[in-house]
Structures are given as structure tokens and as C-alpha cells.
Image (spheres, rainbow, N blue to C red):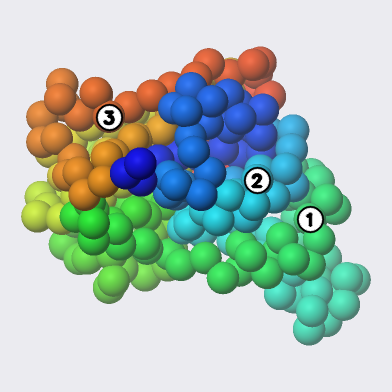
Amino acid sequence: MAPRTVIVGDVHGCSQELEDLLLAVRFKPGVDRLVFVGDLVARGPDSRGAVERARELGARAVRGNHDEKVLSWWRAKKRHGEEGANKLVPLSDRHRAVVEVLEEEHFAWLDALPLHLPLPEHDLVVVHAGVDPQSTPERCPQEVLLLVRSIDHKGKPSRMLDGVPWAQAWGGPRQLVFGHDARRGLQLEPHATGLDTGCCYGRSLTALVLGEGQRLARTPEARRRHLRSVPSRRVWCPPGTGDGAE
Ligand SMILES: [Mn+2]
């Protein structure tokens, strides 16, 4: 059977919905390829389960800003001990809850994730938040790849929701697939596809499913046919303003 590629939006510890989605797309372990757009952890109920399932299924992924946050603490802990880490990298309650359940092997797996992941068989690149449309995934600073949402009135990448969504400003030619922007939700631009449909906020978890060697459809209507979503089982986290670093 030909392997498909299933690219999953921000899971944020929603391991039950991840199982629901894998069932909905009839994911075949050992055959299909699984890719995550990052932010596997934090906000939802089961960050550890989400990381374990990703590892178990041999998934590839890019690192998200929440993954990076708990990794900064873990890296500091290795050098300065737990007390030192708490001083150097103060954690919010939601990130504290993550570092308390992850083991060394989970941190190490997250730490090995790249910031951009090319999938040449589908002629696309996966990033967590996005890129500066003036640049490329390879040349963008980490901060932009992990946090950008918009291009501000000065033409600079911004983590806020004001200005133009970066995905609208991205002229290609490469197709980018990303997450991070739950507030805007599904984004279907000519050269960018945003998959964060706010699972942890009680909305849905979305996957982009591509057949072997299949390219993304160019029009939004046609691209919707690649998408599959499952509803959230509940509101796991109260929606915030959605425009900060978090
Ligand atoms: Mn994010």
C-alpha cells in the first residue's frame, strides 16, 4: 500500500483527539508517515502522552515555541541544576506542569527536532509559526520561525495579530505548512497552509493528508479536500488573546 503523509496541527497535549484524528484518517503505522507542526506540549491534559505517541509512531516534527520553552528550562537544568533552571528560566504554571511529566527521553526527542522540515516528496516545507516573507525558512531567525503571526505596517515580522497574516504576504514559490495561529485558525493561502484549529481551546484538531508524492492543490477549495478534522472532546484551556508569545 502506498504510504501517505499526514501532517497534524498543534496538538498541545490533546492526546485523545490525536487518537481520534489518527482513526479518522485511518492512519497505518509502519506505512503512513506522520508529521507534526510543533507545540505537541502544554495547555492540554496529556503532554507526555502526545510526545510518547509521536515517538512511538516514528513521527517527524518541527519544534514549536511551547516545546522550546520547556526545552530552555531542561537545558538550563542540565547545566545549573533544578534550582538554577528555575531562576534562569522562570516557568508559568502551564509549562511547569509539562516539565513535571516529561522524562529525559522526551526532552531529548523534542530537543532533536528541527525548526524547519522540508518534505521534498510533496514539494513543501513545514515550520511552526511561519517565516519573514522577505526571507526563507533556512535563513529566518529562530524567533520568527517559532513566533511570527503577522507582518506589521513597517513590513516587519510580528508575533501579534495586527497587520497582515504572514501567510498572505508569503509569495512562494515554496509551499509552507504551519501551525501556531489558533486565533486565525485554518489558513489557506496560495503558498501557505495553516493547520492550528485550536484543539486545546475546544475547537478541533486538523490534519493535512497527502498521497504518495502528491503536491498541495493550489486553490483553497481544492486544498480543503486534503484536510480532515476531529472535534475537541472539551475545552481544555480557556482561550486567551492569542496575540502574545504564548
Ligand atoms: Mn505555537
Q: Residue at x 20, y 44 (%)?
A: 214
Quick check: 121 left or right of 82? left
Q: CB atoms at circles 1 and 3 under 8 Å apart?
A: no
Q: CB atoms at circles 2 and 3 under 8 Å apart?
A: no
Quadrant of the rendered structure where residue 86 is? bottom right
Q: Where residue 217 appears, x then y in whole percent?
A: 14, 35
Of residues 147 and 185, the one nearer the viewer is: 185
Residue 215 in the image: above or below residue 204: below
Quick check: 27 left or right of 163? right
Quick check: 157 left or right of 107? left
- Residue wearing tag 3: 226
Q: Where residue 69 appears, x then y in whole percent?
A: 63, 59
Q: Residue at x 37, y 70 (%)?
A: 141
**Disc 3 on helix, strand or loop?**
helix
The quarter in which the C terminus is drawn is top right
The quarter in which the N terminus is drawn is top left
Total count of labels = 3
Q: Where residue 226 appears, x then y in whole percent?
A: 27, 29
Quadrant of the rendered structure where residue 224 is? top left
Structural distance between the alpha carbons of marks 2 and 3: 23 Å
- Residue wearing tag 2: 53
Structural distance between the alpha carbons of marks 2 and 1: 13 Å
Residue 26 in the image: above or below residue 231: below
Callout 3, which amino acid? His
* Few, some or many residues within 10 Å of mark 2 (<14, 14–19, 20+): some
Of residues 182 and 37, the one nearer the viewer is: 37
Callout 1, which amino acid? Leu
Task: Specify which label sits upstream in the sequence, 2 or 1.
Answer: 2
- Residue wearing tag 1: 102
